[in-house]
């Protein structure tokens, strides 16, 4: 069978991350953190928060991940959304976003947010660009401890579910 058929995004499987996925998530995190696109996280931190992570696989290879972090019973965040460089621009990030939106709805969240360098990507799923001040749960719960706090260059997006 032609490998390009097997590597088609339609054949990608999204599932909750497991212990076997930690090193692949760590490798994605290391790559994107080196580019300055995500904050660095240790493998131990990934393992401690593994229940937040979802992965997308093609032919048993983790080619992307994303996390759903809970702030309040009403607010969750899509974060750590990353696709392996050799699988970029194939719709896999969108598959993860759709999965995370579905998961957030299933779990009863009313609002779903993200901090991003590419707000137009999230606009495709009806996220709106908002001021970070509209998300005090994130800003004063997490962002305040970030080294970029006073010079944050990410854009906040929000979707009402």
Image (cartoon, helix red, strand yellow):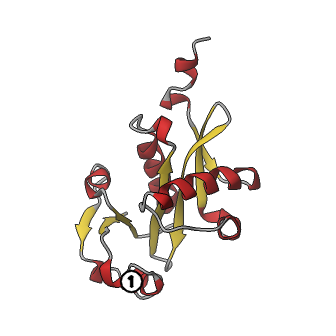
Q: Residue at 45% of width from left, 76% of height from top?
A: 74
Percent across and percent down for residue 92 are 46, 40
Percent across and percent down for residue 30 are 56, 58
The foreground one among 98 and 30 is: 30
Percent across and percent down for residue 13 are 59, 38
The mark total stands at 1
View extreme (right): residue: 19
> In the rendered view of the protein, which quadrant contains the N terminus?
top right
The foreground one among 75 and 91 is: 91
In this rendering, would 145 be left or right of 46? left
> In the rendered view of the protein, which quadrant contains the C terminus?
bottom left
Position of residue 17 relative to residue 114, above or below, is above
In this rendering, would 21 be left or right of 113? right
Tell me the residue that label 1 is attached to: 139
In this rendering, would 60 be left or right of 148? right
For the residue labelled by badge 1, is the local secondary structure a helix, a strand or a loop?
helix
View extreme (front): residue: 34
The image quarter in which residue 19 lies: bottom right
Q: Residue at 59% of width from left, 53% of height from top?
A: 54
The foreground one among 34 and 134 is: 34
Position of residue 156 relative to residue 33, above or below, is below
| Residues packed near mark 1 inside 10 Å, few (<14), some (14 to 19) or many (20 plus) | some
Percent across and percent down for residue 57 are 61, 39
Q: Residue at 75% of width from left, 50% of height from top?
A: 20
Q: Residue at 43% of width from left, 39% of height from top?
A: 88
């Amino acid at each position: 069978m032609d490998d390009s058929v097997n590597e088609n995004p339609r054949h990608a499987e999204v599932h909750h991350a497991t212990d076997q996925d930690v090193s692949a998530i760590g490798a994605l995190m290391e790559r994107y953190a080196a580019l300055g696109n995500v904050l660095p996280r240790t493998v131990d931190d990934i393992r401690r928060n593994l229940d937040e992570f979802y992965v997308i696989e093609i032919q048993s290879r983790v080619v992307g991940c994303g996390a759903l972090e809970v702030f309040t019973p009403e607010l969750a965040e899509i974060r750590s959304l990353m696709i392996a460089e050799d699988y970029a621009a194939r719709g896999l990030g969108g598959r993860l976003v759709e999965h995370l939106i579905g998961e957030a709805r299933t779990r009863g969240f009313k609002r779903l947010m993200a901090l991003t360098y590419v707000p137009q990507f999230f606009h495709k799923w009806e996220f709106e660009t908002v001021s970070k001040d509209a998300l005090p749960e994130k800003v004063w719960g997490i962002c305040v401890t970030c080294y970029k706090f006073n010079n944050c260059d990410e854009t906040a997006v929000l979707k009402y579910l």
